[in-house]
Image (cartoon, rainbow, N blue to C red):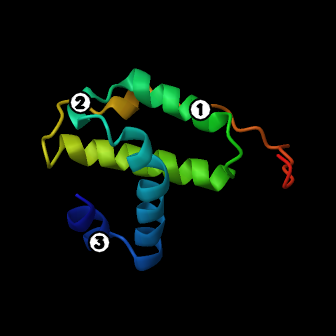
Amino acid sequence: MYENYVVTNLKENNQKNYLGILDNHLIPKFRIHKIKSINPTMIQAYLNELGDSSLFKHTYEIIQTVLRKASKIAVFPYQLIKQNPTIYTQFPQYIEDRTYTREN
């Protein structure tokens, strides 16, 4: 899917962002699951977990975008799943006033 969608449709910088999100966030989290077994509850739990982490807001947004787009194209054109599980999820509210130091 990466080669057919990302490389074909996105500019180089966005390709790097997608690859970074896949390699650092999504693949480590979901690699042990078959795509058909990933459901809205699992995705919502992951999004809630991210909401409690120290990631920057922009990183949250990219993770959500990649996850939603990957799920969407898994439905069509790849027909790996019948329904996009991300349409039933929402990103937790981001706390803007987070201040992190090296000790956090």
Q: Position of residue 44 (x, y in %)?
A: 48, 27
Residue name at image x 14 percent, y 49 percent: 77
Q: What residue is rendered at 41% in x and 78% in y?
A: 12
Residue at (47% x, 75% y) in the render: 13
Between 53 and 9, the residue placed more toward the observer is 53
Res 13 visible: yes
Q: Mark 2 touching mark 3, by CB under 8 A?
A: no
Q: What element carries label 1?
A: helix
In the rendered image, residue 23, in percent from the top left (x then y), is placed at: 42, 58
What residue sits right under mark 1 in the picture?
49
User: Could you tell whether 96 is left or right of 7 in the image?
Assistant: right
Q: Which of marks 1 and 2 is in front?
A: 1
Please provide percent x and percent y for residue 71.
30, 42
Please, what secondary structure does the residue beneath circle 2 have? loop
Name the residue at the bottom extreme. 12
Q: Which mark is residue 83?
A: 2
- Please report the residue visible at 52 percent of the width from the left and 54 percent of the height from the top: 62
